[in-house]
Amino acid sequence: MTLFFSTTPYHEQLGDGLVMKSVATHGDVERLAAFNAAIHDAQVDPMTRALIEHHPHTRPEHWLYVEDEASGAIVSALCLIPWTWRYEDVTIKAGEMGIVGTHEDYRRRGLIRKLVARFKTLLHEGEFDLSHIQGIPYYYRQYGYEYAIPLEGGWHIQMHQIPDADTDEVPRYSVRRAALDDLPVLMQLYNDAAQDLSISAVRDEAVWRFLIEHEPGTANQSEIWLLLDHTGTLVGYYRLDRFGFGEGLNVMEVSRLSHEAAVALLRQLKAAAIERKKPYIKLGAPTNTALVQAARCWDARDTGRYAWQIHLVDVARLLRKLAPVFERRLDASPFAGLTQTIRLDLYREAFDLRFQAGRLANVEAVGFTDGGDLRLPPLLFAPLVLGHHSREALQAMYPDVSTWGQMGYLADVLFPKVDSFIYTIY
């Protein structure tokens, strides 16, 4: 393999006999995979190997660890996994912080803080727009992360809630596992479903190939299944999470479906859950999917959701990138043709958004200022700009979110609440 030929290994002395490194050899992969399994769970070992050695978008230098030079043991680690997101018609470069952990004997020594500092350097060098993590509650706020995209949770439905088909009904749908030959239609089905979301993950052919090629072994966390009608025509797909939270049959992804197909799929899922001795079915897909709506008609229970935690790497650059989104929102509002400078004040720094005839002509970082048209704490801008919470909702929760006069109306036009969901790329 040529995996490590083009990488530049990182090496930083941290003191106290500890050194920060990036993965540079296959031996490093073996050690890191074993460490991640010991800290997290056994399935993280093959997942680490697959992501480093086979995923099309990861880089060895993005896998960081701290080593105790005396023993040669890895004692702390995290990684950067590059993604591409789409916000309506704008492409965003996102860097996931993943598989974070420290050996219990080395905790409370600031090792994650040092790893995060290097991680953020990689984000800036790679011109990432934002970073996301599935991490534990609260902890990552100290590194500039805030909850801003729906994640996990979803709807639970018990098997007894899904009625069996009539005994004399001819089966109209069947399922089979996905194969590489299915790539073109899978990609189309995925892209069609993404049109129902304002923010979604982009999957190119290489990512789909990774998902299918590394799925059958223990390396991948999921199974991709196809739903076919009575003629053998592929009408949809779904993805099961082998190791998701909870003990149910975890449906982590689903394509657009007709109502009839969604009902048939629920019955297929019921059969699979019974065969696998699962106590319930969990639908982790967005609420606006036909599958979830069909389940709700049979009294599926909403268990709520966790959320991706988001760090904005460069606010000004992100705002400039999102100019087409803002301009389209203005054009569809009473503010069409707006010529005005709007000061966004994040308390520690502020940004002037200069609109000319409805177009965002410039975004200027103006540093610390006293006052602005829209003021909010820096961590709260991620849930606002990504549409996780409306300005009105944030203002109701936080007294230090404020607007003046008619600016609240304009802020609501520029930053509305939107539907978003991020299906994973591994």
Image (tube, grey):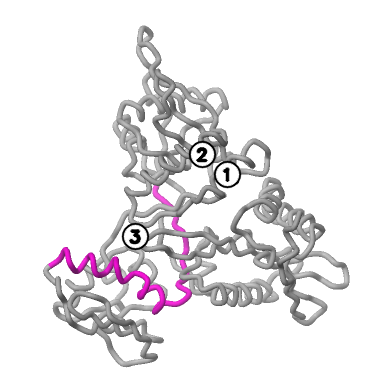
Q: Do the residues labelled 2 and 1 touch (CB within 8 Å)?
A: yes
The answer to which quarter of the image holds residue 298 is top left
Label 3 Cα neighbours within 10 Å, binned few <14 / some 14-19 / many ≥20: few
- Count all numbered tags in the image, as a single digit: 3
Does dot 2 land on a helix, a strand or a loop? helix
357 or 157: nearer the eye?
A: 357
**Residue at the spot of label 2:** 183
Q: Which residue is found at the position 47% from the left and 32% from the top?
A: 280
Q: Do the residues labelled 2 and 3 touch (CB within 8 Å)?
A: no
Give the alpha-carbon distance from disc 3 to disc 1, as whole Å.
Answer: 24 Å
Q: Residue furthest top?
A: 168
Q: Residue 350 carries which label?
A: none
Against 27, residue 282 (above or below) is above
The answer to which quarter of the image holds residue 10 is bottom right
Give the alpha-carbon distance from disc 2 to disc 1, as whole Å.
Answer: 7 Å
Tell me which amino acid carries mark 1: Arg
Q: What stretch is highlighted in magenta?
A: 304-333
**Residue at the spot of label 3:** 89
Q: In this view, does 74 lie to the left or right of 287?
A: right
Against 305, residue 382 (above or below) is below
Q: Position of residue 292 (x, y in %)?
A: 35, 38
**Residue at the spot of label 1:** 209
Q: Where is residue 18 in the image (x, y as percent from the top left)?
A: 79, 76
